[in-house]
Image (spheres, grey):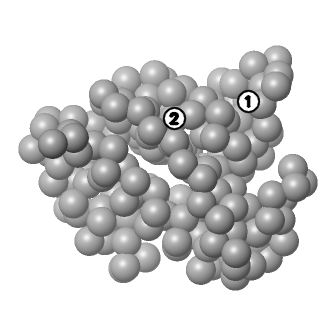
Amino acid sequence: MRELLPLAERVALRLIANKQTIAVAESSTGGLIAAALLAVPGASAYFLGSAVVYTREARRVLMDIPDPDMKGLRSSSEPYAELLARQMRERLGADWALSETGAAGPKGNRYGDAAGHTCIAVAGPAHAVMTLETASDDRVDNMHVFASTALSFLLRTMTPAA
């Protein structure tokens, strides 16, 4: 996790400088994004909470997204990542929310995505979504790449266009 700290520190500095907050919903990163943000001293100034939404039951209970709201959506997709980010932002009243949903490996998921697939979304004053394919089946490496990519994507989204 130490390699995530420089990115988390940059996010923290930006949030603190703007007096903003963040909440995180993650799946295949297993809490690495939240852990990196919480490892930065002073996290209580900007970090509101997180959830590891790894199962359908977690989605229902932690995110308050019932099955009917999933009609036409599937996990590990950009629309689902956007839904998670919007829901987390609203539920915790955060300025920003970051979500991640994917298949770390060593096998793909039941939706047909290969190992190394993740979708990341940011909801806040700016919104963005992306998909990453690492082409790797190394679970731990993918978890770290997904978390690093998510934090970098958040930073880019938070930066106003020049």
The amino acid sitting under disc 2 is Ala
Q: Quadrant of the N terminus?
A: bottom left
Q: Residue at x 45, y 38 (%)?
A: 128
The amino acid sitting under disc 1 is Arg
Q: Is residue 41 above or below residue 79?
A: below
Question: Circle 1 sits in a helix, a strand or a loop, which is it?
Answer: helix
Q: Quadrant of residue 98?
A: top left
Q: Quadrant of residue 104?
A: bottom right
To which residue does mark 2 refer? 85
Query: Nearest the camera: 160 or 34?
Result: 160
Q: Residue at x 63, y 72 (%)?
A: 134
Q: Is residue 38 left or right of residue 115?
A: left
* Mark number displayed over residue 158: none
Circle 1 residues within 10 Å: few <14, some 14–19, many ≥20: some
Marks 1, 2: nearer the viewer: 2
Question: Circle 2 sits in a helix, a strand or a loop, which is it?
Answer: helix
Q: Is residue 58 above or below residue 146?
A: above
Give percent across and percent down for residue 150.
46, 57
Give percent across and percent down for residue 133.
65, 65
